[in-house]
Amino acid sequence: MLKSRLRKKILKIRKKINKENIQIDFNQIVKILKKEKINKKIIGGYYPVNYEVDDLGLLKKLEKNKFYISLPVIKKNFQMNFYKWSFSDPLKINKYGIPEPEPVLKNIVYPDIFLIPLVAFDKDLNRLGYGGGYYDRLITKLSKKKKIMKIGLALSVQRIDEVPINKYDQKLDYIVTNKYIIK
């Protein structure tokens, strides 16, 4: 099935299922960070839109535990950067309707851990995103500079048999759902 048709189908399912904002047990993510002995403290989260899994509770918890929180800012040419952000900082709405931090050059960060929203995933840790390749490009770029951990957040109903992939698609290290974890 074409990626675009697959996207539409899964987004429709996610919208129907996640009207009540189903929560993921974020202790699972804390366990992953401990198990992997993550002592780097920069987390790249996201502001949930379009019925994505809500990571804001986890980000708040991580911020209280002295992690630096960052959110993406969309740039031209399908690029994005992550900017340091705190819950006391204002957000502005971008052209896609997504809240993001004010892009101040000194606040650019390179996260060690990414929490990544996704449309669909498979057992092999492949993710289907929205189609812009923003995360794939950034992960490719940052992976050349340092080791990063990529954790996809999804509902179990977003799992499909096989995500159609190409050479640019980046696999995740973990996928955490409301029912299980894939590593």
Image (spheres, grey):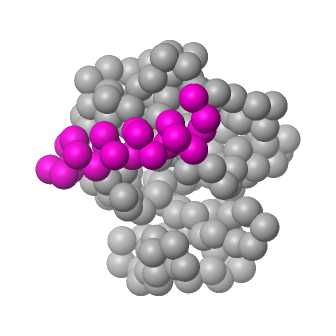
**Closer to the camera, 45 or 170?**
170
Q: Main secondary structure of the magenta part?
A: helix
153 sits to left or right of 60: right
**Closer to the camera, 77 or 101?**
77
Residue furthest out toward the left: 20
The magenta segment is 1-22
50 sits to left or right of 165: left
Relative to 152, say whether 132 is above or below: below
Residue furthest out toward the right: 144
| Residue at screen point 61% across, 35% down | 2
Image x and y of residue 111, in percent: 62, 51
- The answer, for residue 113, to whether it is visible in the render is no
**Closer to the camera, 17 or 111?**
17
Q: Quadrant of residue 107?
A: bottom right
Relative to 85, say whether 53 is above or below: above
| Residue at screen point 63% across, 80% down | 103
Image x and y of residue 62, in percent: 38, 51
| Residue at screen point 51% across, 72% down | 96
